[in-house]
Protein backbone atom coordinates (compact mmCIF):
# COMPACT_ATOMS: atom_id res chain seq x y z
CA UNK A 1 0.00 0.00 0.00
CA UNK A 2 1.53 3.28 -1.06
CA UNK A 3 1.45 6.54 0.85
CA UNK A 4 -0.98 7.98 -1.70
CA UNK A 5 -3.43 5.12 -1.14
CA UNK A 6 -3.09 5.49 2.63
CA UNK A 7 -3.78 9.24 2.41
CA UNK A 8 -6.82 8.56 0.23
CA UNK A 9 -8.16 5.99 2.68
CA UNK A 10 -7.57 8.26 5.67
CA UNK A 11 -9.35 11.14 3.89
CA UNK A 12 -12.37 8.94 3.17
CA UNK A 13 -12.50 7.73 6.77
CA UNK A 14 -12.15 11.28 8.08
CA UNK A 15 -14.98 12.56 5.90
CA UNK A 16 -17.15 9.57 6.78
CA UNK A 17 -16.62 10.11 10.51
CA UNK A 18 -17.29 13.84 10.28
CA UNK A 19 -20.44 13.14 8.25
CA UNK A 20 -21.75 10.68 10.85
CA UNK A 21 -21.12 13.10 13.72
CA UNK A 22 -22.71 15.98 11.79
CA UNK A 23 -25.76 13.83 10.97
CA UNK A 24 -26.13 12.82 14.61
CA UNK A 25 -26.00 16.46 15.71
CA UNK A 26 -28.64 17.45 13.16
CA UNK A 27 -30.92 14.62 14.33
CA UNK A 28 -30.37 15.67 17.94
CA UNK A 29 -31.26 19.31 17.20
CA UNK A 30 -34.42 18.27 15.34
CA UNK A 31 -35.51 15.97 18.18
CA UNK A 32 -34.95 18.61 20.87
CA UNK A 33 -36.84 21.22 18.83
CA UNK A 34 -39.77 18.86 18.25
CA UNK A 35 -39.90 17.91 21.93
CA UNK A 36 -39.89 21.59 22.90
CA UNK A 37 -42.80 22.29 20.56
CA UNK A 38 -44.66 19.23 21.88
CA UNK A 39 -44.25 20.31 25.50
CA UNK A 40 -45.36 23.82 24.59
CA UNK A 41 -48.53 22.48 22.90
CA UNK A 42 -49.29 20.23 25.87
CA UNK A 43 -48.56 23.19 28.16
CA UNK A 44 -46.09 21.14 30.18
CA UNK A 45 -43.61 24.01 30.07
CA UNK A 46 -45.64 26.21 32.42
CA UNK A 47 -44.37 26.78 35.93
CA UNK A 48 -46.24 24.58 38.40
CA UNK A 49 -45.84 26.96 41.32
CA UNK A 50 -47.78 30.19 41.33
CA UNK A 51 -45.76 33.38 41.82
CA UNK A 52 -45.54 34.68 45.35
CA UNK A 53 -48.20 37.11 46.43
CA UNK A 54 -47.29 40.75 46.76
CA UNK A 55 -46.22 41.97 50.16
CA UNK A 56 -48.50 44.05 52.30
CA UNK A 57 -47.67 47.74 52.78
CA UNK A 58 -46.65 47.02 56.38
CA UNK A 59 -43.96 44.61 55.16
CA UNK A 60 -42.71 47.27 52.73
CA UNK A 61 -42.43 49.75 55.59
CA UNK A 62 -40.44 47.17 57.56
CA UNK A 63 -38.04 46.77 54.66
CA UNK A 64 -37.60 50.54 54.48
CA UNK A 65 -36.81 50.65 58.20
CA UNK A 66 -34.22 47.90 57.82
CA UNK A 67 -32.66 49.70 54.86
CA UNK A 68 -32.50 52.94 56.83
CA UNK A 69 -30.89 51.18 59.80
CA UNK A 70 -28.26 49.55 57.59
CA UNK A 71 -27.50 52.87 55.87
CA UNK A 72 -27.10 54.59 59.21
CA UNK A 73 -24.78 51.84 60.46
CA UNK A 74 -22.63 52.02 57.32
CA UNK A 75 -22.39 55.81 57.55
CA UNK A 76 -21.41 55.63 61.20
CA UNK A 77 -18.78 53.01 60.44
CA UNK A 78 -17.29 55.14 57.67
CA UNK A 79 -17.16 58.18 59.97
CA UNK A 80 -15.34 56.34 62.75
CA UNK A 81 -12.97 54.23 60.62
CA UNK A 82 -11.83 56.57 57.87
Image: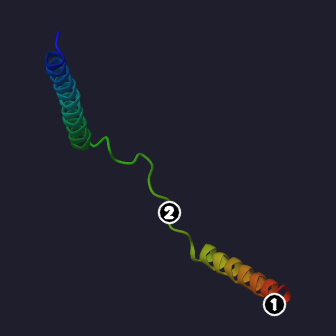
The residue that appears at 25% across and 40% down in the rendered structure is: 36
Where is residue 77 drawn, in percent x and y?
81, 83
Seen at 31% across and 40% down, the residue is 44
Write the residue at 18% across / 22% down: 7
Position of residue 6 relative to residue 78, above or below, is: above
The residue mark sitting in front, 1 or 2, is 1
Horizontal arrangement in the rendering, residue 20 relative to residue 51 (left or right): left
- Furthest residue toward front: 2
Give the image's coloring scheme.
rainbow
Report if the CB atoms under discs 1 and 2 are less than 8 Å apart. no
Q: Can you tell which mark lies on residue 79?
A: 1
Left or right, 46 with reference to 25: right
In the image, 69 versus 12, the foreground residue is: 12
Residue furthest out toward the bottom: 79
**Image quadrant assignment for residue 13:** top left
Q: Which mark is residue 53?
A: 2
Give the Cα separation between the discs numbered 1 and 2. 40 Å
Mark number for residue 38? Answer: none
Q: Position of residue 25 (x, y in %)?
A: 23, 33
Label whose residue precedes the other's in the sequence (1 or 2) = 2
Quadrant of the image containing the N terminus: top left
**Relative image position of residue 74 (x, y in whole percent):** 75, 82
Whether residue 59 is situated above or below residue 21 in the rendered picture: below
Comparing 77 with 65, the one in front is 77
Amino acid sequence: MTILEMLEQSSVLTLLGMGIVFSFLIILIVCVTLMGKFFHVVRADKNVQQPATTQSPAAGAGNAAVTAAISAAVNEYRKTNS
